[in-house]
Image (cartoon, rainbow, N blue to C red):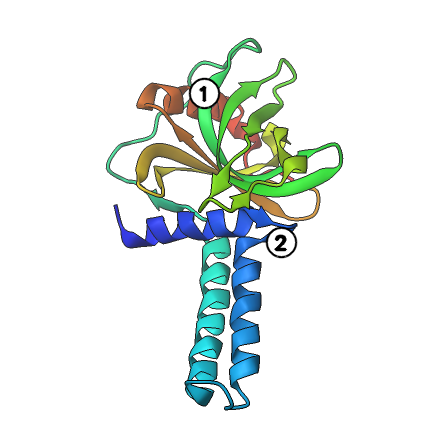
Amino acid sequence: MGLDSRLLRFAYQLHRHEVSGRALDRWLGICLFLVGLLWAWGWLPGGRWVAVVAALLLVGLIAFQVWARRAAYVRFTPSDAQTPPQRGEKLSPEDKIAIRATGHFEVEGRRQFFADLQAFFRTFATREHAVIAYVPKSRFLGIGRWPGHEVGMWYIFFLPRQVISLEWGDLIFGTRRRPASRITYRGEKRPETIYLSFDGEEERRRVWEDILCDADSLGDE
């Protein structure tokens, strides 16, 4: 696995784990800013060179997080090596396909981005698609904790007529490569992209075919 996928996962963990209500990457940025400010006067050992290094590291940290956020903290590679299946069987409302999901989730009026959550994909009798995920408690680097108010169930819902595109490929989060699909759909305010990764090809095929059952609606307003 490439270094970039490991860095993306590291950036996500830094951004999502907190100490005293602030994300770890924010604390790191604050520390670099204070170091640069204090050493800028030239009174402390190392003089202004320390301030220059701290400033460069701060700019690098900001650029690193912007890059990671734009990539959604995952590396998705479209694949032409295998022909995606065409229309097939619809999922029944009772079917639940185990997946891992990345995208913007909502619950009780709250909205948040999460990467690589353990989740289920379902399609209801109305043909509305649902990604149902659970955010667990976790710690990072021994000091960062996941925000307690985010622990619990989160959801993504979208209708067939909202789907703009489907892409077949592979997704890497950290060191783990999995078969995946990228789905772009029309949200309330803007297009939304979600990444679904699967335990195996059979699970991906079932979800792909289920969405394609409404292919006549793809791209419609």
Residue beneath the point at 55% across and 32% down: 137
Q: Position of residue 97 (x, y in %)?
A: 46, 18
Element on which disc 1 rests: strand
Dividing the picture into quadrants, the one containing residue 158 is top right
Residue nearest the observer in this picture, 99 or 216: 99
Residue nearest the observer in this picture, 201 or 163: 201
Amino acid at dot 1: Ala
Q: Position of residue 194 (x, y in %)?
A: 51, 39
Residue beneath the point at 31% across and 37% down: 177
Residue beneath the point at 34% across and 38% down: 169
In the picture as drawn, the residue positioned furthest to the bottom comes out as 42
In the picture as drawn, the residue positioned furthest to the right comes out as 109
User: What residue did someone put label 1 on?
Assistant: 98
Residue beneath the point at 49% across and 60% down: 65
* Above or below for 171 versus 69: above
Crowding around mark 1 (Cα neighbors within 10 Å: few <14, some 14 to 19, many 20+) is many
Q: Is residue 12 left or right of residue 112?
A: left
Q: Is residue 120 left or right of residue 191?
A: left
Element on which disc 2 rests: strand
Q: Quadrant of the C terminus?
A: top right
Q: Position of residue 23 (x, y in %)?
A: 58, 53
User: What residue did someone put label 2 on?
Assistant: 22
Amino acid at dot 2: Arg
* Above or below for 19 versus 42: above
Q: CA distance from mark 2 to mark 1?
A: 32 Å
- Is residue 72 among what the camera can see? no
- Is residue 189 among what the camera can see? yes
